[in-house]
Image (cartoon, grey):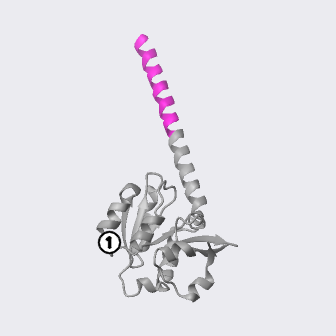
Amino acid sequence: MFLVARMHLLSTLSFTLLYRILIAFVTLFSSFFSVCAQEMPLGIESQAEMFRKIFVFNRTMEGKRIKILIVYNSTSSALVDGISAAFQSRGIETLAVREDAVERTVKEQKGKIQALYITPGLSSSFDKLCSEHQVLSITGVPTLTRLGKASIALGVKSGKPSIIVHLQQLKGEGQEFSASFLQIAQIVQ
C-alpha cells in the first residue's frame, strides 16, 4: 500500500513539474517571437530581397562580392538560420557571429565584409565599429536606425515596406548611395 501511494505521489509530482516546465517553455518562446515580430515589422525574406536591391544603389559596394556579418545573441539566435538562408538564396554570402565576437571577426575579415546585419535584442552597439571599419550597418529593427545605431533599417509604413536611413551614420561608415535611393528613403538625423 505504501509503495502504491508513493508511486502515485511521484507520478503526480512528475506531472506537475513537467506541466510547469512546459508552461514556462511556451511562455518564453511565445514572448520571444512576439518581441521579434514587434521589433522586425518586415519578414526576413522581404528584408533580404530589399537589401539586395538596396546594395545596387551603394557605390561603395560596386564590383564587390557582398558578404554580410549577421550579429546575434541568445535572444535572437533562432532567427540566424532564416536570415542567413534568405540572403544566401539571393547570392549574398553570410557569416553569423555572437555579439561578443563581432569586433574580433570584423578585424579578422577586414575588407571582406561589406555589411553588418544587426538582429533584435542585442545589448551591444556597433555604430562606432562600423564607422571605424567602413562597414554598412543594416537591420530589420527601425528603432535602431532612428537612434543612430544602424545606417539602414527596413520597416513598414501605411502597410507597405519602407526604408529608413540615418544619414549621419551612413556617412560615418563611408557609404556612398545614389541620390535616387536617398529620395525614396525616410531620412533621419
| 111 over 7 or under it: above or below | below
Q: Residue at x 55, y 44 (%)?
A: 27
Give the farthest residue toward the top.
Answer: 1
Looking at the picture, tell me which residue is in the foreground, 162 or 2: 162
Give the percent coordinates (x, y) of residue 28.
Answer: 53, 45
| 174 over 16 or under it: above or below | below
The quarter of the displayed image where residue 83 is located = bottom left
Q: Which of the image's four quarters has the C terminus?
A: bottom right
Number of numbered markers: 1
Q: Residue at x 37, y 61 (%)?
A: 102
Q: Which of the image's four quarters has the N terminus?
A: top left
Q: Give the range drawn in magenta.
A: 1-22
Tag 1 residue = 110
Looking at the picture, tell me which residue is in the foreground, 179 or 9: 179
Q: Which residue is drawn at 43% across and 54% down?
A: 73
* Principal secondary structure, stretch drawn in magenta: helix
The quarter of the displayed image where residue 157 is located = bottom right
Give the percent coordinates (x, y) of residue 90.
Answer: 42, 78
Q: Residue at x 51, y 59 (%)?
A: 120
Disc 1 marks which amino acid?
Lys
Give the percent coordinates (x, y) of residue 186.
Answer: 63, 76
Let me know if residue 3 is in the magenta part: yes
Which secondary structure, mark 1?
Answer: loop
